[in-house]
Amino acid sequence: MSPDNGAASAPPFDVVELARSLIDFDSTTGGEGPVARWLAGWLRERGYDVEEQPVEGDRINLWVALGRPDVVLSTHLDCVPPHFPSREENGRLHGRGACDAKGIAAAQIGALDRLRAAGETRVGLLLVVGEERGSHGAHTANRTPRGSRYLLNGEPTDSRLGIATRGVCRVRLSATGKTAHSSHPEEGVSAIEKLVDALVALRTLPLPASPKLGDTSYTVTLLDGGIAPNVVPPVAGAEVNFRTVGPAAEVRAALEPLKRWVDLEDVAEVPPVELVTVPGFDTAAFRFTTDIPFLSAWGRPLLFGPGSVLLAHTADEYVEIDELRAAVGHYASIATALLEPRPEARA
């Protein structure tokens, strides 16, 4: 790969126009193939060497390297449903993925362009699929790391550097009972009532806390139960999503009293993450999870991005256009700080 990787022949581009082009593809998780291949072609037209990394079906990750990267910018190309196209209004860019995370992808590409134009040969770009459901692209990429020292991940953080992110512990609560005719409930055992008792008790359980990440939170996300409206229900279940601030085992230990009513089954686990920062940016801890735990082989992690997580996944997702444009320079300056001979990165 040549040191300038096509920099001399690539004219400037507008980050908002690129973001809009990406947003206008429906890349709901599982359907990222078209947007990824379009973007691969767009990057090649600008002189970049692009590696398409197969994930499954027509889904691919994209890898771009300037020389031998020490710092890798990374985010995801998939989105949650439902898709809605881009529009600009009152200084805001609206559309699915505007802040989570196609606007971020456009800003990172802008930063890569800026660094390439300055002659930088120690930066890369990794764009993955599947972050919103299962992190399949990150798992695939983690099997072939490229020797980088830092991973600068992009998610909406209100243009602050993250100091930590929470983890996830999803647990299924399953209750069993005994069927009976509903006119004689005393002849049966209601699994639904046992499940309700467990969920009410859950409200009073002391859950782990952390000085940096705060109190463990949870949401009852799925409920099912019963077999007919005139039968005492023999089965019932719920899934509970805990946002963890420490080891998942601590949450499971706190749930032991619920075994009086229900069985407990682990569904999924993502650990909380401590993050690196550099001087010059506001910082914060974040409740959400990212691909970072699944890209552990790509270097020490940082987290930064324009837009608010409170707008991600909403019916009118947007990012402020000025913040999106500024993110290009922010990503470039963070990467530059990390590339100093003695980077002032702080755990």
Image (spheres, rainbow, N blue to C red):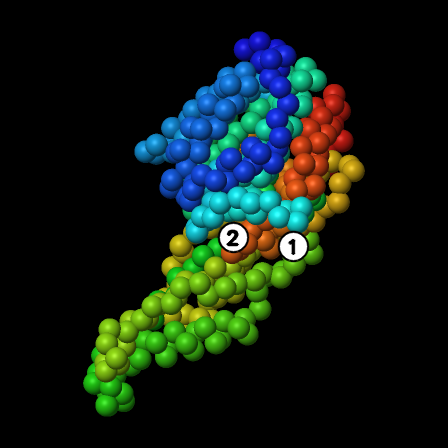
Labelled pair 1, 2 in contact (Cβ < 8 Å): no
What residue is rendered at 29% in x and 81% in y?
189
Picture quarter with the N terminus: top right
What residue is rendered at 24% in x and 73% in y?
227
Of badges 1 and 2, the one in the foreground is 2
| Label 2: element kind | loop
Which is nearer the eye, 292 or 297?
292
Task: Indicate left or right for 161 with 41 as reference.
Answer: right
Q: Amino acid at mark 2?
A: His
Binning the other alpha carbons within 10 Å of mark 2 as few (below 14), some (14 to 19) or many (20 upward) gives some
Q: Which label sits on residue 213?
A: 1
As drawn, 43 above or below 34: above
Q: Amino acid at mark 1?
A: Leu
Give the quadrant of residue 198.
bottom left
Q: Which residue appears farthest toward the top when viewing the image? A: 2
As drawn, 16 above or below 63: below
What residue is rendered at 62% in x and 48% in y?
89
Which is nearer the eye, 64 or 313?
313
